[in-house]
Amino acid sequence: MSASTRAAGTAAIPDPRAPYRRRKTTRGNFELYSWVFMRGSGVILVGLIFGHLFVNLFAGDGIQAIDFGFVAGKWANPFWQNYDLVMLWLAMIHGTNGVRTIINDYAENDTFRLVLKLALYLAFFVVVVLGTLVIFTFDPCPPGQPADLLPSFCFA
């Protein structure tokens, strides 16, 4: 390639025999950890979801038994509260991380990418906070309700 071609603005091809020079990057390993997290959380989520489906659909009376009383009975036990909480948080973090990756891959405009990520993080925050509040502040035996509408364990 001549010197005039290089001066015209085309980039020169690097010498293939030159020793490899590692570029110094300012980024950490966030993307690597994100990738590893997606694989691990995916495996854990599959187990949690199949456990959830088994308990809710197969272990009891099937889908006909799922009503307010069923959910109230499950959430009266701290084990099921924490089980559902872990499933909620892990699913939301996993999904948010996946959508963040899609936004990084396909949103070309930096401003648009920022707006999409802010909307994503806001939605994540709202769902996680409201879901956590519902799980832990759910009162299966609200005072002043008709007895025939309340689950049987409210009278124990």
Image (cartoon, grey):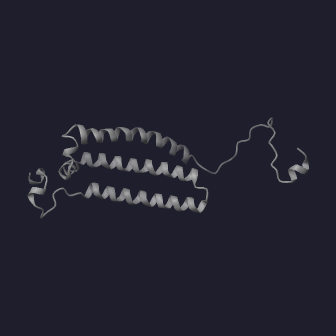
| For residue 75, side relative to residue 34 (left or right) | left
Q: Position of residue 60 (x, y in %)?
A: 19, 39
Q: Position of residue 108 (x, y in %)?
A: 61, 56
Along the line of sight, the residue nearer the viewer: 38 or 108: 108
| For residue 67, side relative to residue 89 (left or right) | left
Spot the residue most to the top: 17
Residue 56 vertical position relative to residue 147 in the rendered view, above or below: above
Spot the residue most to the bottom: 144
Along the line of sight, the residue nearer the viewer: 69 or 23: 69
Please report the residue visible at 42 percent of the width from the left and 41 percent of the height from the top.
42
Number of numbered labels in the structure image: 0
Please report the residue visible at 37 percent of the width from the left and 56 percent of the height from the top.
128
Q: Quadrant of the N terminus?
A: top right
Q: Position of residue 39 (x, y in %)?
A: 47, 39
Please report the residue visible at 9 percent of the width from the left and 58 percent of the height from the top.
147
Q: Position of residue 125 (x, y in %)?
A: 41, 59
Residue 82 vertical position relative to residue 125 in the rendered view, above or below: above
Please report the residue visible at 21 percent of the width from the left and 47 percent of the height from the top.
66
Along the line of sight, the residue nearer the viewer: 28 or 6: 6
